[in-house]
Every structure is written in structure tokens, then in C-alpha cells.
Image (tube, rainbow, N blue to C red):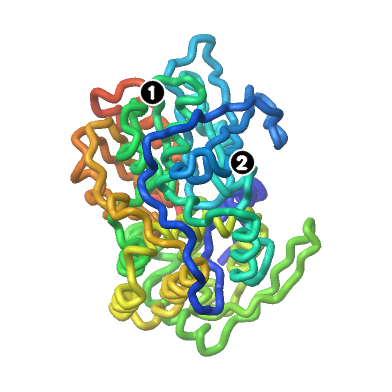
Amino acid sequence: MTPCHLSKSRLHRLSLMSLVLLLTLVACEPLTPTSTPAPSPQAQYQPIYQQTECLYKVPAGLNVSCGNLVVPEDRHQPAGRKIQLHVAIVKSSSLNPAPDPVIFLQGGPGSSAIDVVFMLAPQLEPVLQQRDIIVFDQRGAGFSQPSLACSEDDLEQCRSRLVSEGINLAAYNTTENAADVNDLRLALGYRQVNLLGGSYGTRLALSVMRNHPAGLRSVILDSVVPPQLHYHAETVRNFETVLNNLFNACAVDTACNQKYPELKTVFYNLVQTLNAQPGSVQVSIPDRQINFTSQVSGDELVQLVWGYLYYPEAIIYLPEMIYETSQGGYEVLAELLKVRASMPDSTSRGMYLSVECTGQVSIESRVEVAKACSELNPVIRDGVCEEYLQIFDTCDVWAVPRADSEEFEPVKSPIPTLILSGYFDPATPPQYVPQVTQALSQHYNYIIPDGGHGVVRTSSCAVSIAEGFLNNHATAPDSNCLKQIKPLEFK
């Protein structure tokens, strides 16, 4: 068997799309909650857009203008503290662009959207030929101020510092984020806009559809998160299904099945072997002068496979990694660990926790998630469930109250909506789509057969479908490109 190496370009793409990993935290006594979030009242303020210098290097070939959107931190106190959301407007290459731009809503939550859109600009060129793309760092994240990033290792210390700075942690939630989107539209003077949301960005887009529908022309949901979804329990339940998608894809591929027969059995045996005796893997990143030895257990292998199912460009290496590791070789595994270690950790931890703990964590319980874990194959149970159970301890520490109950109801809307999903996506699999479409009177739904998490990022077919939808949402967009997608070619 010939060892494989991820190319530098592929390494770069992977490193820019970091996973949102839950951090291992020690349970503490709950702290006093900050004020309870609820639907924002009728605005009694004027959102302000101030043009500024860009706070980052704009890639060559892009025409970008930057600014800050100034809005209240808490719209129930419109005269109170103000926050700044950093905005980038990527100009269309058209001399006469459409009057309804696309606002890009980043996933996470907690990561910078501006870096991601700059990376995606070449992929989104068909959209930019017709429309401007507007992107902003959500409140508490990226270049927006204040930042809810935690430099402290201790979560309680981070929380105490942010509260002592006068930050209302409960105001950093999906309802306020949705109002920010609408205020951005108003401040820039657009009658209507189109939304393109990915992952958590779909959850945010649905909230905008619920609370601020008048300003929306159409919505694209890429890797959708239904608002009523009990995310952690359902993700645990779906893990084996998604994992089996990988095994089945290899089994029906003649070349893959010949090289890696009985992949599922080999994988489960490998997890047990590594849990009994972890593998010692040498990882070297010369350009960053990083060298370390990683003791990889079976549970850690499960988490690694889970993480790389996000990325089609990595999925193709997973069967080889599983087989090579089972035979005592660690070259492919070391390469995947190298990529993970190279990923920048730019997530605003505080913003992530404020959104998640006021949101979907608050409608679940540890008992519910533990029950879902009990239904898993015991070989992979600990590898899957540890972080999904820890989030409840983490939210006890962060101590923000639950959002208004309306935010967890299905969104009923006539707004034209395009839903895109990736077949291999472990976080927002296609089976979540019916929970969204049940209440949308005009929707189109497509599954990208070789897609992972966030299909617009990697699939030119997904972009083509999105472009057709944006240009004419009255009829189903041309999806013939789906027929041209070949199965993944495993290495």
C-alpha cells in the first residue's frame, strides 16, 4: 500500500475551515444569570453604519469596502451600551449589480465570517458577477467589538472578566443576532436582501425569517439546523448512520472495497485496540517549529473521523488511514493530526457559549443526551458522547438564561428558500431537512452526493444551484449538475 500525503493546497483549505470543538471543562457551581433574553422590542434607536478602513489585508482582485454597524447591545435598553459589528462589502464585478445583495451568515457560532468569505470568493464568483456579497462578524466575534474571546484557561475567570467589563452575556444570542442582520440591511439602505447561511448561519437565517421577514427576498440554507432540533441528542443518534455512509460508500466502490474490505469491522476493532493500547504518533510541522508525540486512543480516533467527515477533501483518505493504522502504520494518521494541529483557534469562546447556552443546549437535558448515548454501539460511545455531555456543565458555568420559547418553534414562511445538504455531513445531515421544510410554503431541497458540512464551500454544483435560485426563485433551479457528480474517489 502506497502512503498518501495531503497536498499543501488541501492542507491550506482544511486549516482555514476549523471545527468548532467543545472544550474540556471542570464543572462548577452555577453563577448568577445575567438578564433574560427575549424577542427584541420595536426599535427605538437608529442603527448607524460608519465607513472605516478594513482591519485586514484584502485579497488581490477583490473590491471591498469596510465599515462598522453600531447597534445597542441589548435592544430592551436602546439608550444603553453600544456595540460595533465589523462589516465587509465585497463588490460585484457587474457594472449594474442587482439591487438585492447577498448577506453571508457565518456558522460556528463565534468564528470570524470575513476571513471565510475572502477564502470563498473564488468559489462564489458566479454570485459576485451579479450581486454584492455583504459579510459581517457577528456580535462578540472576529473583528467586532466588544470581543467575547477568552484568553483565560479557566472559563469562570473569563466570564467574570467579561461581566466586570459591563458586557451582558445574555444579549449575545440568536434573537439579537437576527436583529443585527435586519439593522445592517436598514443602515445600508436596501429594501430587500438575500441570505446565505451555513451551519449555525442557517439557524440565524431562520430567526431573521421569523422576526424580520419584510426585508428578505430569498434565503439559502447550507447545512441546516432546525430551531426545534434537540441538536446534541439527535447528533448522537445520527452518528452511526453518518459513519455507515462512509463504510457503505467504500463498500460499493470496487477499488475501495478491494483495498479496504470489511472497513466497518476493521474500524470498530481498531477503536477497541487503541483504547486498550493507544498508538504513539509523531507529528511534525516544520514551518511552525512544532514537534510532538500524540498518544491516540480509540475514542480520539472516533473524534478524528467525526471531524474529518466535515470535509470531502479529507473523507477520501479515511479508509486508508483506518486500514494503515490497523496494521501499525501511522503516516496518514500523522498527516491528519498535523492538519488538525495547524488549524487556527480563532473562535470567540464566549460568544459561542452565549449563543449555544441561551439556545439549543437550553431545550435539552443531560438525561436526554445520556439516553441517546446509551443507544450507541458501546465501542464508540465514549468517543462520541464525552463532549456532548460536558456542554451541560459548561453552560452551568456560563450561566445565561434560555431564549424565549418562540425561538425554538418551526419557522412558518412563504419566503423562497433553497436548502442544500451534504450526504456525508455528520453535524447537519440531510435527515434534518424535513423539520425545516414542513413550515416553508416555497422551498427547494437538494443533497450534494459527495458533500460534507457546508457544501457551498467545496461544490461548484451547489454554487451553480444557488446562483440559479438567486436569479429566479419562482421556479426550481437547474440541478442537472448533480447528475454529473462522480462518487468520491478514495485514496
Residue indicated by mark 2: 115
Residue indicated by mark 1: 192
Q: Residue 335, position in %: x, y?
A: 63, 63
Q: Residue at position x 60%, y 39% from top?
A: 84
Q: Residue 195, position in %: x, y?
A: 41, 33
Q: Nearer the viewer, mark 1 or mark 2?
A: 1
Looking at the rendering, in which quadrant would you find the N terminus? bottom right
In the visual, does 80 lie left or right of 272? right
Q: Secondary structure at mark 1?
A: loop
**What label sits on residue 96 in the rendered view?**
none
Q: Residue furthest top?
A: 95
Which sits in the foreground, 407 or 480? 407
Q: Amino acid at mark 2?
A: Asp
Q: Secondary structure at mark 2?
A: helix
Q: Residue at position x 57%, y 59% from top?
A: 349
Q: Amino acid at mark 1?
A: Gln
Vertical comparison of 335 with 453: above or below:
below
Mark 1 vs 2, N-terminal side: 2
In the visual, does 14 lie left or right of 404? right
Quick check: marks 1 and 2 in contact, CB under 8 Å?
Answer: no
In the visual, does 219 lie left or right of 189? left
User: Could you tell me how far apart the alpha carbons at marks 1 and 2 are, in whole angstroms?
Assistant: 25 Å
Q: Residue 29, position in %: x, y?
A: 50, 78
Is any part of residue 247 visible from this angle?
no
